[in-house]
């Protein structure tokens, strides 16, 4: 099983948008995916029915020993399940937040996810390295960092990579799978220059080829709490960028999607 954290130092860079849409793409590509809302704000909960958003989730699993099997939700995509952030008790918030910095808090989550046969667990985190974001970073194998194409992006990203290196030096086992440039305006020369600059200052190959464009459809989708592919009857072209990203990440993770397995390769026509 692969465990993946979507993490950034800055807020509002597109972590939740990336987590939700990437989870859908990976599930569509044949993987059994668990999307975990590890942000106490409960952003993924937006994409659920009101009843589901009041359901217990990660908080209850980590603090009350509840089982993943009874907490994770089925979704409209057969192989995608969601674990909400849960109903955090304000009276225990500070204690839980402190405990959540430890890897051991999340061991039961990943052990049970493996036991339930999930192939990929994607954790959406709150920005920064503290509380549950820290515990998740200490527990996962891989980290994906969304980064907006903006002035000084290279400098702030460099600092964050250093912080993550410090965490690794303290014994965390994750590797950085890649940086994803988000909210790129293809019609703005400045935005493209900034994206190029990020690529230039980062170590070779760290920045993924796939870039998420700035598109009002993402805003519309998150206002409605939906993955982009569910906005219209027909999947909008904007959603396809996440399929492309899923493919690129599969390659880096050494995964081979069932969609890419060779078919029978026999002639289409049968008969004489
Ligand atoms: N590619 C995009 N194009 C346009 N708007 C976007 C794009 N990606 C995200 N947004 C919008 O930007 C806002 C922030 O995105 P999102 O919630 O995904 O960021 P985040 O990093 O999870 O934020 P936080 O740090 O608060 O958790 C949302 O309103 C979202 O709809
Ligand atoms: Mg978020």
Image (cartoon, grey):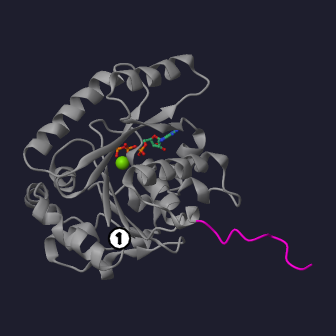
Quadrant including the C terminus: bottom right
Spot occupied by residue 181 in the image (x, y as percentages of width and height): 44, 34
Whether residue 177 appears in this view of the structure is yes
Q: Quadrant of the N terminus?
A: bottom left
In the rendered structure, which segment of residues is drawn in magenta?
262-272
Residue at point 7%, 45% (across, down): 170
Is residue 195 toward the left or the right of residue 60 in the image?
Answer: right
- Image location of residue 17, percent across then percent down: 45, 49
Task: Give left or right: position of 237 versus 251.
Answer: right
Query: Looking at the image, which residue is at 47% across and 54% down?
Result: 22
Magenta stretch: includes residue 256? no
Near-viewer residue (136 or 270): 270
Q: Which residue lies furthest to the front in this view?
A: 272
**Which residue was labeled with disc 1?**
54
Q: Is mark 1 within 8 Å of ligand 2?
A: no
Q: Main secondary structure of the magenta part?
A: loop
Assess whether residue 267 is covered by the magenta stretch: yes
Number of callouts: 1
* 196 lies above or below 83: above
Q: For residue 89, what is the image quadrant?
A: bottom left
Q: Quadrant of ligand 1?
A: top left
229, 114: nearer the viewer: 114
Label 1 crowding class (10 Å Cα cut-off): few <14, some 14-19, many 20+? some
Q: Nearer the viewer, residue 247 or 143?
A: 247
Q: Is residue 26 above or below residue 272?
A: above
């Amino acid at each position: 099983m692969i465990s993946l954290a979507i993490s950034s130092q800055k807020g509002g860079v597109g972590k939740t948008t990336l987590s939700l849409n990437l989870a859908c793409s990976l599930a569509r590509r044949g993987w059994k995916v668990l999307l975990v809302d590890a942000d106490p704000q409960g952003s993924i909960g937006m994409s659920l029915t009101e009843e589901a958003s009041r359901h217990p989730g990660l908080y209850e699993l980590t603090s009350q020993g509840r089982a993943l099997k009874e907490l994770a939700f089925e979704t409209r995509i057969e192989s995608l399940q969601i674990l909400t952030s849960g109903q955090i008790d304000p009276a225990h918030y500070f204690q839980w937040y402190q405990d959540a910095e430890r890897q051991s808090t999340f061991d039961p989550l990943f052990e049970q996810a493996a036991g339930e046969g999930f192939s990929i667990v994607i954790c959406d985190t709150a920005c920064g390295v503290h509380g549950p974001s820290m515990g998740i970073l200490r527990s996962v194998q891989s980290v994906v960092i969304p980064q907006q194409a903006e002035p000084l992006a290279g400098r702030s990203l460099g600092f964050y990579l250093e912080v993550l290196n410090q965490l690794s030096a303290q014994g965390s086992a994750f590797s950085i799978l890649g940086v994803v440039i988000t909210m790129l305006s293809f019609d703005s020369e400045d935005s493209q220059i900034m994206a190029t600059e990020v690529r230039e200052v980062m170590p070779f190959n760290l920045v993924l080829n796939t870039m998420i464009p700035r598109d009002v459809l993402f805003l519309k989708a998150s206002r409605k709490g939906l993955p982009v592919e569910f906005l219209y009857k027909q999947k909008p072209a904007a959603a396809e960028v996440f399929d492309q990203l899923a493919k690129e990440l599969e390659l880096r993770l050494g995964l081979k999607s069932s969609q890419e397995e060779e078919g029978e390769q026999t002639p289409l026509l049968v008969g004489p």
